[in-house]
Amino acid sequence: MEKMAWISYLRELNVLSLTLRIVLAVFCGGIIGYERGKHQEAAGFRTHILVCVGSACTMLVGQYMVTVLGQNTDPARIGSQVVSGIGFIGAGTIILNSRHQIKGVTTAAGLWASAAMGLAVGVGFYECAIIMCIVLHFTLKRLNQMDDQYVKLTTDARIYMEYEKDFHFSQVVRALRENGWRIVFLEPVTEESAVGASVQFIMRGEEDKGVSKEEMLEKIRKMQDIWYIEEL
């Protein structure tokens, strides 16, 4: 009973519960932000802490208006604006670079999840916030390692290439076929002009039946009229 009384006390609005919620928001947001910061993402350690703490405080304000000031309003009304408002910050982390690659989607999703985690902390739903923090950390850290392992095991390679206007892409297709590779995806990045063009494509092959990925790229790189080629 004494344990239940402590839990109930911490769910109320008092100095101890306020301190605990803010500290927990800093801790949970910091764990997620630290992982993102290690990958040099636009939103890192400080950003995730600010989002999580801000969301928690927003929820606390809603509770304060009802329990202390006695206003007849929905305590979740202010907190609900965080869900839509975080979209502006998340959108700022998503970029489309010059090679038509979309970057920052995972970071944007992490910010949104951190905001939800902050709302859980702010309302006093400690169990949900802690479990969510563990799941988010596992997803961003461990599953990222699984993605890296998959990239190492697969023979697929996404290639970006720039070439002069006189170059015929059929030369690349023919070279790939001759060396046990084939193109499974092709997309122009820039339209062909008087100077040249650029494309990105995915090539797939069985390295035990042909040359390695590195050797194949080197063969293409040595072709005449190709300015630049790299694996993305």
Image: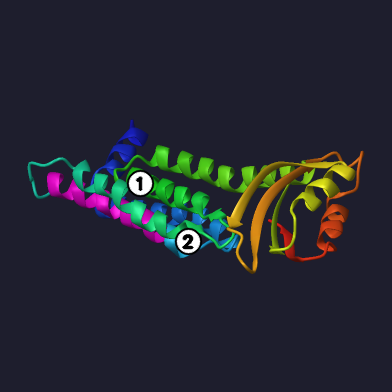
Identify residue for label 2.
43
Quadrant location, the N terminus: top left
Quadrant location, the C terminus: bottom right
Q: Which label number is shown at residue 121?
A: 1
Residue at the limit of the structure toward the top, as seen here: 1
What are the residue bounds of the magenta stretch?
49-67
Q: Magenta stretch: residue 57 in it?
A: yes
Q: Magenta stretch: residue 4 in it?
A: no
Question: Magenta-highlighted stretch: main secondary structure?
Answer: helix
First in sequence: mark 1 vs mark 2? 2
Badge 2: how crowded within 10 Å, few (<14), some, or many (20+)?
Answer: many
- From the viewer's perspective, is residue 88 above or below residue 137? below
Q: Secondary structure at mark 2?
A: loop
Count the numbered circles shown: 2
- Place of residue 171 in the rendered image (x, y in percent of width and height, measured from the top left): 80, 52
Q: Can the viewer see residue 156 in this picture?
A: no
Q: CA distance from mark 1 to mark 2?
A: 21 Å
- Place of residue 84 in the rendered image (x, y in percent of width and height, measured from the top left): 30, 48
Position of 69 with respect to 77 (left or right) is: left
